[in-house]
Amino acid sequence: MPVDIPHDDPAERLLLRASPGHLEKFWDLMEQIPVPVGSIAERLGLDVYSVTLDPNISGSIRRVAPTKFEIQVNDTDAAVRQRFTVCHEIAHYLLHTSFIDAEGIEDNILYRSQLSNAQEAEANRFAAALLLPWKTVKDWHFEQFGEPVNKTNLKAIAEKFRASDLAVGYRFGI
């Protein structure tokens, strides 16, 4: 399936940095509500495990074989946070693969790791774009409320897409 990233999506340039071959593996899932983040990981060949981690750690991604990667998410975090964490780790896989080794990239509760702040910011933006696809959210919102995405309906978007209010606000700048 060809990848059609809307030109008005603020994350367009970042999304285009991912391999087209990787994006094609899961892009059809971006129209589902909520986006099945586990299926995205599965199509990319990433194993995801929900485990109890240190309370200050939200998740990690590590290389377990030359071409095999594993994501761990903290099972004590809220479900919406776990979904975001999976997307954040997928973003590291798609954007920062060369930095992932057997020790992995471990993200604390503020999504900070040994990577630069710029790389963590990229992973956050990419994660929000996966969790809240620009066109899908905008189309759903217009169907439901007859108006463009706005702050008034932030909670409704968050609930429908199984995301946090914070992630919705971040993604849509509201």
Image (cartoon, rainbow, N blue to C red):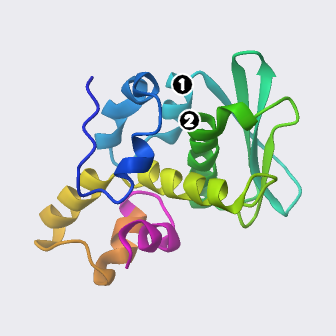
User: Was residue 100 drawn as part of the magenta stretch in this picture?
Assistant: no
**Residue that protrudes farthest toward the top in the picture:** 66
Q: CA distance from mark 2 to mark 1?
A: 9 Å
Residue 41 spot, x, y in % from top left: 56, 32
Q: Residue at x 39, y 27 (%)?
A: 20
Expressed as whole percent of the image width and height from the top left, the position of residue 36 reads: 45, 40
| Residue on which disc 1 sits | 44
Residue at the outermost left position: 146
Dot label at residue 94: 2
Residue 86 occupies which quadrant of the picture? top right
**Quick check: marks 2 and 1 in contact, CB under 8 Å?**
yes
Q: Position of residue 98 (x, y in %)?
A: 70, 31
- Mark in the foreground, 2 or 1: 2
Chain part drawn in magenta = 160-174
Q: Position of residue 51 (x, y in %)?
A: 80, 43
Three-letter residue code for mark 1: Leu
**Any part of residue 34 in sight:** no
Q: Is residue 75 left or right of residue 159?
A: right
